[in-house]
Amino acid sequence: MLKIHNLEVCYDKHITVQNVNLSVQAGEIVGIVGESGSGKSTLVRSVVDILPKGGCVTNGCIHFCGKELTTLKDKQMNAVRGKDIAMIFQHPQLTMEPLMTIDQAFYECIHVHRKCERREAREIGKSLMTDLGLEKPDRILNSYPFELSGGMAQRVAVALALVNGPKLVLADEPTSALDVTVQRKMIDLLLRVRDKTGCALLLVSHNFGVIAKMADRVGVMYRGKLVEWGLKEEVLYRPQHGYTDRLIRAIPKIQW
Amino acid sequence: MSNIFIKRTIALIATLLAITFLTFVVSYLSPGDPAEIKLSKTGMPPSPEVIEETRKAMGLDRPLPVQYFSWLKGILKGDMGVSHRTGQNVSAVLGKAFPKTLTIALSTVLLTTLIAIPIALLCVRYTDSLFDRVIQSTTYMFVSMPSFIVGLVLLYVLAVRLHWFSVTPGQGLKGYVMPVSVLVLSMSSWYIRQMRTIFSNQWSMDYVAGLIAKGISKRRVLHRHVLKNSLVPIITLLGNSFATLMVGATIVENIFSVPGIGHVAIEAVLNRDYPVIQGFVLWTAIIYILINFLIDRTYSVIDPRIRLRKGETL
């Protein structure tokens, strides 16, 4: 469904991601691990072209459902973003518009892709949040992002991402800003979302534990390159690259 | 809510009282005897007896607190005293100047906003483009020039060369075209630069990436969400500019002979016309306090973080 071929991303002529090949099948969870600065965030952001200022794809292709994303015009790209490919960020509160209530956020997210009434948007948001196990959805809908706790905001962010029935969800460190107990819940939630909606998940984390728990297929990024790529079991038990080996041995032993 | 309102009102009155007292004292202590100045207007040097009589008639022989309170009592009744120079009521003098200054202030702030916001938004949308760079250098030029130079150049070109407007103040609204243009030119230059900075700061925030990832067009994100999130600093700046103009755009009013508040203030200072000076200072204080109060209110209307945090502390 998503196929990245020979991708190269630069920030002001400085190469951050180089020669990356990977693919995500429908309904699959692909996890990318790597230390900070390894280019994993850049990789997922380049899929929907939301790189920070100065960043751009300089080589390679990103193929998604028959479209070549790197050559799409802004307008065509807008139709893909939030619709077929949704995104979850590390800091849900910072990535939500601070002056919009959750209610308004739901409306805005649906409204850009199809005609919809405010009341309808509210109902959709409410049922999605109830499905995701959020209590008192009406109260959440009337709140502003800064009024929510981190874990709650991240679950709301998941609900907002799912609102248009995406085929692929990109998750950039979705658990890293949460404390450990909430992290666990978040992982379960994302797994449940995959099982229920059948959407694929491209997950990026520095936490090998999270990736090991969730992913079907794993990639390891090191200094802008994908040094390891394969099924989770292969990568975990028969790492090809020395860096992966060191990374695996660095996982703290915690009983899940 | 009512608690905070009462506290604020008390603070407001206290500030006003302090300001009125200070101005009164400063005027009282400054050299130059108003009675003598008033009498010298007739052209003949007055005798000491006449000066003494006039001082008594004007109430200048009473002790300072008594003078202050009688002045303050008058203020509360709307009577700010009588101009030493012209014998006119101070409230009437200010009242006559007020509509002219209000016209200038309102139209300047309005036009500046209408010019600066779209241009600044375009600059951010097309950062480092030719358009952006041309705007940056042009505004830089106007910002570094004093407004009276812009005024004199405009006066020369439009009035002396092109004869579009007369050098003497025009009739009706036409008289405002030139002073307002000068103010708008230098003010919008400054505002384009300020707003460009404010918008581009907002543009690099995480929520912008979040909104774009939802499929919202960059245009809409900028024009709707970034603009809305920039309103607090923008309203603060515009409010302060409005207050400054309401107190009188002294230089521009004088160049273009607009008899506004700034004009009145200069005349009063040059003639040591204490009642008018006091009236002017009081006017300044009221304007600043009122506008800052309004700016404060709009903060909580715009930003729920400010509104709700205030609610918690109550």
Image (cartoon, coloured by chain):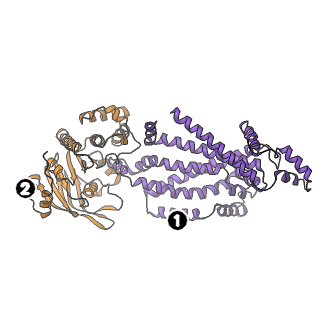
| Rendered location of residue B253, percent (x, y) | 70, 54
Chain B shade in the render: purple
Badge 2: few (under 14), some or many (20 or more) residues near its Cα, within 10 Å?
Answer: few
- Indicate the secondary structure of the residue bearing disc 2: helix
| B51 displayed left or right of A167 | right
Name the tint of chain A in the rendering.
Answer: orange
What amino acid does circle 1 point to?
Answer: Ser
Q: Chain of mark 1?
A: B
Find the distance from the CA under tag 2 to the CA under tag 1.
Answer: 61 Å
State the residue in front, A226 or B90: B90
* Left or right, residue A118 beside residue B249: left
Location of residue B282 in the rendering, given as x and y in whole percent from the top left corner: 68, 45
Task: Report x, y in % for residue B306.
Answer: 45, 42
Answer with the quarter of the image where residue B182 lies: bottom right
Residue at 78% from the left image edge and 45% from the top image edge = B63
- Comparing A138 with B81, the one in front is B81
Eyeballing the image, is B279 above or below B134? above
Residue sitting at x 91%, y 50%: B50
| Type of amino acid under label 2 | Tyr
Determine if residue A176 is in view: yes
Q: Nearer the viewer, residue B63 or A243?
A: B63
- Label 2 is found on which chain of the structure? A
Residue B260 appears anywhere in the view: no
The number of callouts visible is 2
- Secondary structure state at the residue bearing disc 1: helix
Residue A17 position, x and y percent, is: 24, 63
| Residue that mark 1 sits on | B137
- Circle 2 is placed at which residue position? A237
